[in-house]
Image: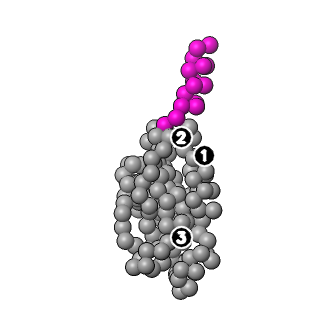
C-alpha cells in the first residue's frame, strides 16, 4: 500500500521547466514582433516541444509583403528540431537540452525567441498549452 501512495505523490510532484516565446520579427531593424509560439523544455520529464500558431493578419499588419510561406517552413523545422525528428537534420540529433538551447539562443533574424523564463510544473505538456493559450492565442 505505501508504494501506491508514493507513486501517487510522484505523479503530482512539481519540477522545473524553462520556456521561451517564439516570435516572428518581419522587420528586424524595427524590433516589432508577433508572438507565434512557445518552446518549453523540462529535463526531469524529458520533454521538449514547440507549439506554433501564426496569425497571418497580425504579421501582415507589421509587413504587408511578409513571406508567410517561408516563415511557416522555418517554424515547421523549428518544431521538428525541438522534437528530435530524425529527418530534421543534424541539429535534431543533438541531446534534448542542446536542441532547446540552440533553438532559443539570442539571434537577430526573422524568427526569434524571448529570453528564457523558468517555472515549476506538474505536467510539462499541460503547462505548454497554458502558456500557448496566454501568450500566443
Q: What element carries label 1?
A: helix
Residue 80 in view here = no
| Residue shown at the point (39%, 48%) measured from the top left | 97
Q: How is the image coloured?
A: one colour
Q: From this viewpoint, which residue is outermost toward the top?
A: 1
Crowd tier of the residue under label 2, counting other residues whose Cα lies within 10 Å: few below 14, some 14–19, many 20 or above: some
Q: Is the C-beta separation of discs 1 and 2 under 8 Å?
A: yes
Disc 2 element = strand
On residue 34, which mark appears? 3
Q: Quadrant of residue 52?
A: bottom right
119 in relation to 86, above or below: above
Q: Is residue 6 magenta?
A: yes
Quadrant in the picture for the N terminus: top right
Q: Residue at x 61, y 51 (%)?
A: 130
Residue 135 occupies which quadrant of the picture?
Answer: bottom right
**Which mark identifies residue 121?**
2
Vertical arrangement, residue 66 with respect to residue 54, above or below: below
User: Residues in magenta?
Assistant: 1-15
> How many marks are shown on the rendered structure?
3
| Closer-to-camera residue (47/93) | 47
Marks 1 and 2, how far apart at CA: 9 Å
Q: How crowded is mark 3: few (under 14 residues within 10 Å), some or many (20 or more)?
A: many
Residue 126 falls within the magenta-colored stretch: no
- Nearer to us: label 1 or label 3: 3
Decide which of tag 1 and tag 2 comes sooner along the chain. Answer: 2
Amino acid at each position: 500500500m505505501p508504494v501506491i501512495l508514493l507513486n501517487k505523490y510522484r505523479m503530482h510532484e512539481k519540477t522545473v521547466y524553462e520556456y521561451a516565446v517564439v516570435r516572428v520579427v518581419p522587420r528586424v531593424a524595427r524590433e516589432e514582433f508577433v508572438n507565434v509560439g512557445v518552446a518549453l523544455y523540462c529535463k526531469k520529464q524529458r520533454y521538449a516541444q514547440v507549439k506554433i500558431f501564426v496569425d497571418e493578419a497580425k504579421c501582415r499588419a507589421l509587413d504587408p509583403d511578409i513571406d508567410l510561406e517561408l516563415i511557416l517552413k522555418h517554424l515547421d523545422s523549428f518544431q521538428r528540431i525541438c522534437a528530435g525528428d530524425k529527418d530534421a537534420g543534424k541539429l535534431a540529433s543533438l541531446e534534448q537540452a542542446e536542441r532547446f538551447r540552440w533553438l532559443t539562443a539570442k539571434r537577430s533574424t526573422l524568427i526569434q525567441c524571448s529570453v528564457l523564463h523558468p517555472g515549476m510544473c506538474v505536467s510539462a505538456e499541460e503547462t505548454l498549452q497554458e502558456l500557448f493559450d496566454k501568450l500566443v492565442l
